[in-house]
Amino acid sequence: MRLAYITAFSLCTLSLVACGGSGSTGDTRGAGGPAVQADEAQSPHGRAPTPAEAWKDDEPATDAPTETTGQATEENGEEDATPEDPGAPGKPVVDGVGKSEAALSTSYGTTFDLTYYWVANRPADDPNQVTLRDCDGRFLTYASYAWRDAVRMEMTGRFTASDGTKRVFNDAGGCWKLMSSFYDWGMGVPSPISGTSYKLRPFRSIAVDKSVLQIGRWYYVKELDGVKMPSPRSSLIHDGCVRAVDTGYGIFGKHIDFFAGLKSAYSTLMNGSTTMAGRSTITVYDGAAKCGIHIERGY
């Protein structure tokens, strides 16, 4: 699971299309409120921010080490080219993790709280002020103090490595753990079928209370249907389908945390002219009827 900044919303209709990841980090703020700063709130996905002195990354930036370095590059908004995420059940099944089919159906068509989360992406012009290292002391990337603090708040950071790949690292309790390059947006919870963690996908992945909505299952959110998504997937006209692939310590009951990928994408949705601006509730439906193509493809 991962952390991200969130914006508190009441979800009414849920079932979008997303990314894939290992936890979330985001910005928490009520729908319609002003943009949230990195140090103002914490996503329901993570735990309380770790004190600065507990972290192992407060050394001044030095000359580039021999290990793979993370160079600041501009976010280009590319879509994930990987066609499938691991552990895709193919068709929704009841696996004992969530409620029974009969119990699940009682949650459909009801109001859910809506929040958002994202990863702290390193800006192109981010200065090299400190060095971030993993839990074994190996170099991860350089960072500005501001980005370092944003990563701590969201519990997940994303940067471009020297080979051009997007890399994501997670909070591991006072130090950082680098994920496989396969999880270029982050890692969700393990699949109840295969045990392999789902990939987070912007605008498709949601974090849920697994006692209310089933992990791995697709859901349909009417309010999302037809909405044009901002960067990092600006070509996507949403069909309302989302997949439950993540959880969070602050996600309880009828509450959905929508993975926006980047904070800038969240800000566009909230402050732009889309029908999602200021929305705090959505209605969630089972995705079997509307999301068949995604269920068939497994992503």
Image (tube, rainbow, N blue to C red):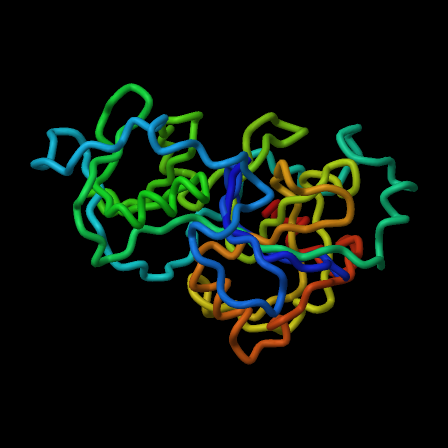
50 relative to 8 in the view: left or right: left
Q: Residue 288 in the image: state x and y as whole percent.
A: 78, 53
Quadrant where the N terminus sits is: top right
202 or 266, which lies in front? 266
Horizontal side of residue 92 vs 122, given as left or right: right
* Image location of residue 3, percent across then percent down: 51, 41
Residue 203's image quarter?
Answer: bottom right
**190 over 243 or under it: above or below:** above
Number of dots carrying numbers: 0
- Identify which residue, 106 or 46, lies in the foreground: 46
- Say which residue appears at 29% left-offset and 19% top-offset: 136
Residue that appears at 38% across and 47% down:
150
* Residue found 26% across the figure and 34% down from its top: 132
Instruction: Name the residue nearer the viewer: 299 or 185.
Output: 185
Question: Which residue in the rendered view is the most extreme toward the top?
Answer: 136
Position of 61 relative to 218 (above/below): above
Query: Residue 44: horizontal and vertical position, in percent?
Result: 60, 43
Residue at 64 percent across and 41 percent down: it is 250
- Decide which of 299, 29 is in the foreground and name it: 29
**138 is higher (above) or lower (below) than 2:** above
Q: Position of residue 293 (x, y in %)?
A: 66, 56
